[in-house]
Amino acid sequence: MYIIKVKGKAKIPDYIQLRDNNFVLIAYFRADRPLKNLDRYGLEGKEDALALLIEGLEFGKLQKLEI
């Protein structure tokens, strides 16, 4: 699975994209909102680690999600 942070413009907020190994979009959510329904993506119980990772992500840089 891969993660990328997308920079918003003006009134559009920053977003996070989760992509599978074929780079198909599987989740798209606001970076400033609490993380919900992560069990759909096999990330249950990893909310704190994912939130910490999102804070440190660079905009526009795709990276492998390893938490």
Image (spheres, grey):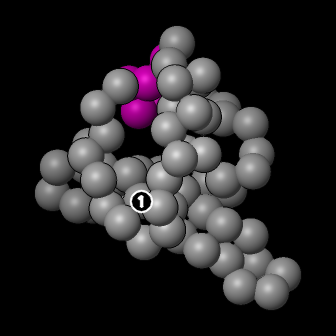
Q: Can residue 17 be seen in the rendering of this structure?
A: no
Image-quadrant location for residue 55: top right
How many marks overall? Answer: 1
The residue singled out by tag 1 in the image is 4
Left or right, 26 with respect to 58, comes to left
Secondary structure at badge 1 equals: strand
Left or right, 3 with respect to 13, comes to left
The residue positioned 52% from the left and 12% from the top of the image is: 45
Q: Quadrant of the N terminus?
A: top left
Q: Which residues are magenta?
A: 39-44
The residue positioned 49% from the left and 68% from the top of the image is: 59
Q: Is residue 49 magenta?
A: no
Q: Is residue 57 above or below residue 48?
A: below
Q: Amino acid at mark 1?
A: Ile
Q: Is residue 51 above or below residue 48?
A: below
Q: Is 31 in front, or is 29? A: 31
Q: Can residue 45 be seen in the rendering of this structure?
A: yes
Q: Is residue 58 above or below residue 26?
A: below
Q: Quadrant of the C terminus?
A: top left
Q: Is residue 41 magenta?
A: yes
Residue sticking out furthest to the left: 22
The residue positioned 44% from the left and 24% from the top of the image is: 43
Left or right, 39 with respect to 36, comes to left
- Report x, y in % for residue 20: 25, 49
- Report x, y in % for residue 30: 68, 56
